[in-house]
Image (cartoon, rainbow, N blue to C red):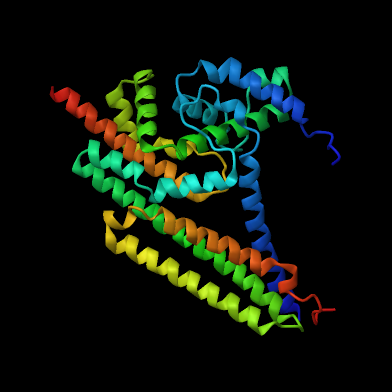
């Protein structure tokens, strides 16, 4: 029983820190228009926009087009190597977040008396499909070279939305019946 | 929500932000110079921000909060800006420079001091993207400098 409690506490801490990080980034985007005056680089004000901007930067074509048209081969190679590293780190971060959310969910569900097998099955399928998609994109980035990085922004964005949807579904109160065996 | 005694009020923070913007940041040449200035107001050991002028006009907690926010905002803005703009910002910083361009480029390439320009920020990918983009921007500026020297 005490082990379950500890696991539950760890899971809760992980998800709480995830939610905290997401909210912190959201809060950072608010009310900073004062700095925009005179700034040539445009800061975004919404969290969603900022995340989209980040994905566009990592996977989009704009920087690659600039590099391809105006720089030497060694610089192009350096750019591709750097972007590949970031893309893989981003995928790894996404997988860790999904795993933390799922671990938390499984811990809660184990302690629950009212399981909903269909909902659980759907969530499990979503989770493994998500991991498979992450793996596929990582393989494409690793093996595909420049062609793979180009135009991946859409895939990356859909992956990011998948994760958000999954975390939201796994944290819904109705997804976890409250009658637990823990007194 | 109740305000804690030592917590800066939002009005004070707003005034201090404008003060920092108008008196200090507006006089710096470009976002890169602003980022370097703001990072330099942070103590290496404690990670806390300090600015005598701001602390005098407002309070230390207000100054600290304002510097941290400004640092984060300029950093994110540069980290997520297109590479083309980052290269232009870097060139502008080098031109307005405190050291000779060759020396600065060599030092930055060797020691990567730009790693300490990142604020305490929740998203490691943005920090990684910034460092990586600076590496690429440096390579572009170095190559263009070499090209200039040849002609």
Q: Residue at x 63, y 27 (%)?
A: B50
Q: Compared to B54, does A43 lie above or below? A: below
- Which quarter of the rendering shows the N terminus of chain A? bottom right
A43 with respect to B150 (left or right): right
Query: Residue B136 at what x, y percent from top left?
Result: 32, 40
Q: Residue at x 58, y 60 (%)?
A: A164
Q: Compared to B7, does A87 lie above or below? A: below
Query: Residue A182 at what x, y percent from top left?
Result: 81, 79
Q: Quadrant of residue B38?
A: top right
Query: Residue B96 at what x, y percent from top left?
Result: 38, 18
Query: Residue B135 at what x, y percent from top left?
Result: 34, 40
- Which quarter of the rendering shows the C terminus of chain A? bottom right
Q: Compared to B115, does B18 lie above or below? A: above
Q: Is residue B106 visible?
A: yes
Q: Quadrant of residue B95?
A: top left
Q: Compared to B65, does A177 lie above or below? A: below
How many callouts does the rendering have?
0
Q: Residue at x 75, y 68 (%)?
A: A173
Q: Residue furthest left?
A: B151
Q: Residue at x 48, y 28 (%)?
A: B36
Q: Nearer the viewer, residue A89 or A46?
A: A46
Q: Is residue A93 visible?
A: no
């Amino acid at each position: 029983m005490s082990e379950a409690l500890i696991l539950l506490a760890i899971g809760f801490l992980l998800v709480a820190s995830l939610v905290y990080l997401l909210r912190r980034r959201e809060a950072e985007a608010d009310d900073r228009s004062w700095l925009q005056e005179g700034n040539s680089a445009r800061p975004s004000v919404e969290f969603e926009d900022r995340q989209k901007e980040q994905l566009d930067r990592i996977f989009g074509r704009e920087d690659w087009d600039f590099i391809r048209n105006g720089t030497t081969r060694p610089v192009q190679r350096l750019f591709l190597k750097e972007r590949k590293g970031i893309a893989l780190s981003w995928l790894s971060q996404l997988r860790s977040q999904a795993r933390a959310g799922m671990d938390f969910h499984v811990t809660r569900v184990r302690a629950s008396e009212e399981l909903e097998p269909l909902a659980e099955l759907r969530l499990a399928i979503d989770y493994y499909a998500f991991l498979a998609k992450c793996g596929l994109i990582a393989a494409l980035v690793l093996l595909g070279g420049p062609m793979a990085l180009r135009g991946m922004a859409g895939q990356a964005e859909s992956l990011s939305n998948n994760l958000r949807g999954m975390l939201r579904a796994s944290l819904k109160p109705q997804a976890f019946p409250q009658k637990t065996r823990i007194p | 929500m109740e305000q804690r005694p030592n917590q800066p009020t939002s009005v004070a923070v707003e005034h201090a932000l404008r003060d920092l913007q108008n008196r200090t940041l507006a006089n710096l040449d470009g976002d890169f110079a602003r980022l370097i200035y703001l990072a330099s107001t942070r103590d290496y050991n404690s990670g806390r921000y300090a600015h005598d002028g701001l602390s005098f006009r407002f309070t230390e907690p207000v100054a600290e909060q304002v510097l941290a926010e400004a640092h984060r905002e300029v950093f994110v803005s540069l980290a997520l800006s297109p590479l083309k703009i980052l290269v232009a910002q870097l060139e502008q910083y080098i031109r307005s420079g405190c050291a000779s361009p060759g020396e600065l480029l060599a030092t930055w390439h060797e020691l990567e001091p730009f790693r300490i320009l990142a604020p305490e920020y929740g998203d490691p990918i943005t920090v990684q993207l910034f460092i990586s983009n600076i590496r690429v921007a440096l390579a572009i500026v170095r190559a263009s400098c070499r090209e200039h020297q040849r002609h």
